[in-house]
Amino acid sequence: MKKIAALALALTLGAAVGAKDARAQSTLRDQVRSWRAAHEREIVIELAGLLALRNVASNREDIQRNADQLMGMLRQRGFATRLLTAGDAPPAVYAELATPGAKRTVVFYAHYDGQPANAADWGGDPWKPVLRTGLRGAPGTKDMEILEAVASTAPFDPEWRLYARSASDDKGPIVAMLAALDALKASGVKPSVNIKVFLEGEEEAGSSHLPAILKAHQDVLKADAWILGDGPVHQTRRMQIVYGARGVTGVEMTVYGPNRALHSGHYGNWAPNPAVLLVDLLASLRGPDGDIRIAGFQDDIRPLTASEKAAAAAMPPVEDDLRRELGLAWTEGGSERLQDRIMQPALNLRGLKCADVGAGARNAIPTEASASIDFRLVPDQTPGKVRERTEAYLKSQGWWVVHEEPTLETRLAHPRIVRLTWDEGYAAARTSMDLPVSKAVVKTVEEMLGEPVIQVPMLGGSVPISLFLQGLPSPAPPILVVPIVNHDNNQHAAHENLRLRNLWDGIDVFAALFARLSW
Amino acid sequence: MKKIAALALALTLGAAVGAKDARAQSTLRDQVRSWRAAHEREIVIELAGLLALRNVASNREDIQRNADQLMGMLRQRGFATRLLTAGDAPPAVYAELATPGAKRTVVFYAHYDGQPANAADWGGDPWKPVLRTGLRGAPGTKDMEILEAVASTAPFDPEWRLYARSASDDKGPIVAMLAALDALKASGVKPSVNIKVFLEGEEEAGSSHLPAILKAHQDVLKADAWILGDGPVHQTRRMQIVYGARGVTGVEMTVYGPNRALHSGHYGNWAPNPAVLLVDLLASLRGPDGDIRIAGFQDDIRPLTASEKAAAAAMPPVEDDLRRELGLAWTEGGSERLQDRIMQPALNLRGLKCADVGAGARNAIPTEASASIDFRLVPDQTPGKVRERTEAYLKSQGWWVVHEEPTLETRLAHPRIVRLTWDEGYAAARTSMDLPVSKAVVKTVEEMLGEPVIQVPMLGGSVPISLFLQGLPSPAPPILVVPIVNHDNNQHAAHENLRLRNLWDGIDVFAALFARLSW
């Protein structure tokens, strides 16, 4: 998942586990783990084979090779497979495995494309997997060729890591799903749901065709829930279940001074200074404490439920450590918790630019000043509504809003001109924790792991769950995120890696979801 | 003069000219002009010879050659000459010519060093003077070698321009002074004052040794007034007399957020945003209309006199044209005139920088945000007092002021930290228009020209007149600026030039100041 990164999250205790369920789950756990322990080499070889395929979405030949290989891997497990396409987008790999008598159908999502990578940054080919006995660069860490490691009879240490582009983002979860099915089959355990698999081929390129693909294949994709296998687990290494994420929309703002830079001595405090105007504009939008002053901005906020508040309150108190680590004497919102803050909308000033500072500063009144803002949205805010309210508010503050470079006539007619350039953005999404499927997923995972998972009502970071909502029938089936990979996986960067322990845990989790999920 | 540039200034009428004075002045004017008309070739040759000497202050051999040549030119006119030095600074050329019976002594200042220049920008050697029949690039303009022009018998057109580095800034005024003395001698007119000449050799390099040179030679430089022959006339081409200039001091400000950039989704409205803090700080310093909110900032302002207000009010109404030209629908201070505004202190926000905007913007909470400010000062503000008041004000607003990069301990201890880096700056200066010498200079120039001059109580731009005040005995003799060169002289840039009409006018003005000034 593109934007689920290191995030401090809290623990929430699931429902008490009934004695019988616990026994059944403990049996399943033993079965899956003993199968996995006996097949670690095969699992790693299958994943390494998939990782050896270059998978940047813009290279259609590479993408097709990945899709072909995945179709083969799925067919081996008894899936009926096909490619789902829309226009010239990289195809989604689709597969289904019916479970006779099953009442529910669940789509398991992952993506097989990866971020671009280059050999210089990696110190080697990013698509040539390497097993390391620990974190790259840590003292005593040894590199092993995959075949060398597999040939050795020494047991795999679960702290070893598999290094390659997409090891964790997001091919690891795909192989975890397939290995989980192998483990179930070997143990004679029948799935509890109809399983559909949807593997996207352009997630790292922005998923721009995802809504069209989903829309074009609504019948095929009919389901009672979606489970997204993407993103990292909590930084404490504990499993988490994520119900939503903030949306996002960005705007570039430029305000204007004289149409050529003026000597600040000869014209300073006569000619209007665009940097000062920008400061005035920005100060009117939000305060230092995070309060957003745009009229009506809060109107579209869907209130948090009691479960969501409780889940947030149950998070472990990471704030003091974070503050110390980041060198912060305070945080916005006073004593409010991090999770409480990021379940509210935010206006982040991500950049300022006007002429130059420091050695490059000139004694001049600049011609223009710019700010860049990203808004983080919560349900039921939309980029369109944020744009509308922001522009209305700026007009109410005396600004003349334009979307193109103002002409001389416009400049002469309006004292305060701001040019706005909005990006498309997308809305937030938050699946209710109180739905039966939500409770069932938590129960299933907790019983399998034998310990509570962290429940995250909404990530602060933005994940385009709303792209799913755009493509799926309305009302859309519930969407939950069940991440399995380590948080320290160098996602999107050089030396992306997957810790074997997380791959093993993922197999447990997907096996449980395939075999025990019911609601 | 480094910083006197295009500036809209007004007309003030001098005192009515008495009939007898007018007659005497009209005789002097005729004498000077007829001598000049007969000697234009010699004057241009002498100036071209001086312009042929490279004169960047950092090249001591070049500078010495200029100084030697100037000493020779001055001795030819009967001056006693010497070099005034301090440390290893480029020497000032000093010369004096006593006038038996004269009651007053006046130092005439100019500088002989020039801005760096390169052949690529000029399309030829900047120190190889060329006469052009008009503005470079204008249709029909012809270039002439100096010797070719001089050899021809055609009369010189006063719209011709002499192109070379320092033609106008500031060797033209030096040659105008010397030619004026030649004209007086040829006409049998005795000076009215003791004349001292002080030619600085590092003005374009910042005049950093000027106070030391003045201080070391206070006895030699004893005088009743200084007249600075530097800077351009008004852009209407009318002569102006300037009484002062704003001072200047600059400060770089940096405020701090988290010590590494944070994902704005995961941490946005929890981790403090330095750009937002900077906006809050800057909004507290001044308003969009130019009002400076720093407590006590206005305390040191010396009130304007009735004469100064009257001179400002008499300026021609250039504001509407300027606004149209600059694309401005309004100006700071409402209907206040430009000259009234620039006689007040200013806080100019000359630059902003924080992360990036536009295509380079990232969805992150930045680590720091910076602003660059130049303050324009008026008498009797000083850089030291501005610094003191600004820092006290910021502290009163809850800022922890530091002058070095804050340590982690400092960051953890103080919520709002601002790092300030001040430049040295210098104070404003304003000679009273009501002094007898001020009135005498105006009267002398107006009688010579037969028309009123524009009187500028204070330039908005900063000129380091305060460096003179630092070096001269206290109380310092009055200092006035009498510019002669054309405003469109490309000062400091490629294709610097001097319009011959301005050189001729300058000879008139200096002749009058040498021969008629008395108070």
Image (cartoon, coloured by chain):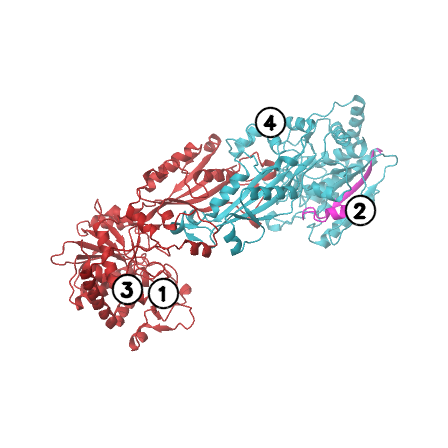
Chain colours: A red, B cyan
Marks 3 and 4 sit apart, C-alpha to C-alpha, by 80 Å
In reply to whether residue B193 is colored magenta, the answer given is yes
Q: Secondary structure at mark 4?
A: loop
Which region is colored magenta? B188-217
Q: Residue furthest right?
A: B100
Mark 3 vs mark 1: which is more N-terminal?
A: 1
Looking at this view, is B129 or B425 the one in front?
A: B425
- Residue assigned mark 3: A505
Front tag of 3 and 4: 3
Residue at image mark 1: A126
| Crowd class of label 3 (few under 14; some 14 to 19; many from 20; radius 10 Å) | some
Numbered disc 1: secondary structure: loop
On the question of residue B65 being in view, the answer is: yes
Separation of disc 2 and disc 1 at Cα? 73 Å
Q: Nearer the viewer, mark 2 or mark 3?
A: 3
User: Both on one chain, marks 3 and 1?
Assistant: yes
Label 1 is found on which chain of the structure?
A: A
What element does badge 2 sit on?
A: loop
> Which residue is depicted at the point 76% across and 23% down?
B17
Q: Position of residue B321 (x, y in %)?
A: 56, 30
Amino acid identity at mark 4: Pro
Q: Is residue B190 magenta?
A: yes
SS type, badge 3 = helix
Disc 3 and disc 1 in contact, CB within 8 angstroms:
no
Residue occupied by mark 2: B217
Amino acid found under the numbered disc labelled 2: His
Q: Quadrant of residue A501?
A: bottom left
